Amino acid sequence: MEYNKKLDNLFDRWEQEAKMKGFNGFCRDGLLYKGKIWNTIGSDGKTYFGRGPGNEDELWYNANKKIIFLTKDTNSNPNQDYREWLGRQGEGIITHKFFKNIAIWLYGLSSFDSQGKYSTFEEAAIGENYTRAFDEIPFCIVNAKKESGGPKINNADLLYHANLSARFLKEQFEILSPDIIVCGGGQGSVLKVAKEIIYPELEFIKINNWIYFNAETQKVLIDSYHPSAIISYEEMYLGMMNSYKEFLEKER
């Protein structure tokens, strides 16, 4: 399955319509690349790093848990492709809070075994562990609003843009067919995008304050904090993992 090739076809149509409506700065996203790391000199003279395509399609196809991190929009990064991003500049440890939390959550969610046991926070928070997870485990980052914005977007604007491009957003999720969607923040607005815009035909039952489940498709929505929220890494990790563990125990 050529997931990113299908996404590129979708993005060509999506961006064309967005421009016709007067929106610019379209950013592609989805299944992050797992190929070679490259670098380039920007117009500001700084060196920027990214990653090229690799075996991400195969990894995603074979993944036991297909995890998408659904977020709002990019911050001042017009016309970029999120799939190239490393979460840091260079090949070192990820320290940027947004990407560090995503990496730690990815590590934790991917660590669950058949008995509902998962990696401790102490293990997940080791830089080499979560950075390796970000680099090697297949996962997606999808923005509900594709046009780059600023540091903040109010919930009404987010829902407006998501509704405006609902058919494209739904198609993106149909291509990727995730098992778990981590809805990042927005005081429930990102969860609302998932429930009412992406999957309006599905009924998600609230399991606890974090977890919503559709039995028919076995899809899980996680109503998470924003990855950049001013809350400790440990509190967010344990809140998410314990809630997911509770869900697994109820469904076992």
Image (cartoon, rainbow, N blue to C red):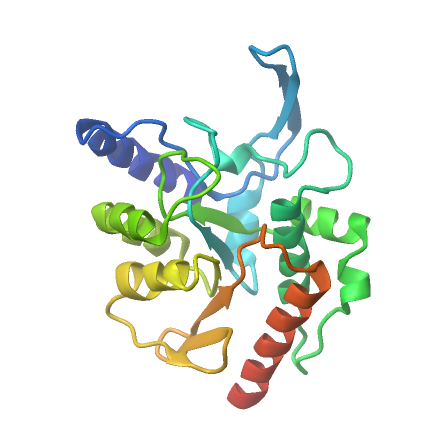
Splitting the image into 4 quarters, where does residue 10 fall? top left
Relative to the observer, which residue lies in front, 208 or 252? 208
Residue 111 visible, this angle = no
**Above-or-below relation of 108 to 9:** below
Q: Does 167 sit left or right of 56 as displayed? A: left
- Relative image position of residue 234 (x, y in whole percent): 72, 64
**Above-or-below relation of 108 to 86:** below
- Relative image position of residue 149 (x, y in whole percent): 41, 35
Residue 15 visible, this angle = yes
Q: Report how many numbered discs are placed on residues in the image.
A: 0
**Above-or-below relation of 72 to 222:** above
**Quadrant position of the C terminus in the picture:** bottom right
Q: Residue at the location (37% across, 49% down)?
A: 154
Relative to the observer, which residue lies in front, 243 or 10? 243
Q: Does 90 sit left or right of 54 as displayed? A: right
Q: Does 176 sit left or right of 17 as displayed? A: right
- Relative image position of residue 201 (x, y in whole percent): 24, 69
Q: Residue at the location (31% across, 27% down)?
A: 24
Splitting the image into 4 quarters, where does residue 233 fall? bottom right
Q: Residue at the location (72% across, 42% down)?
A: 94
Relative to the observer, which residue lies in front, 10 or 85? 85
Q: Residue furthest left?
A: 20
Q: Residue at the location (49% across, 48% down)?
A: 141
**Above-or-below relation of 188 to 8:** below
- Relative image position of residue 142 (x, y in whole percent): 44, 47
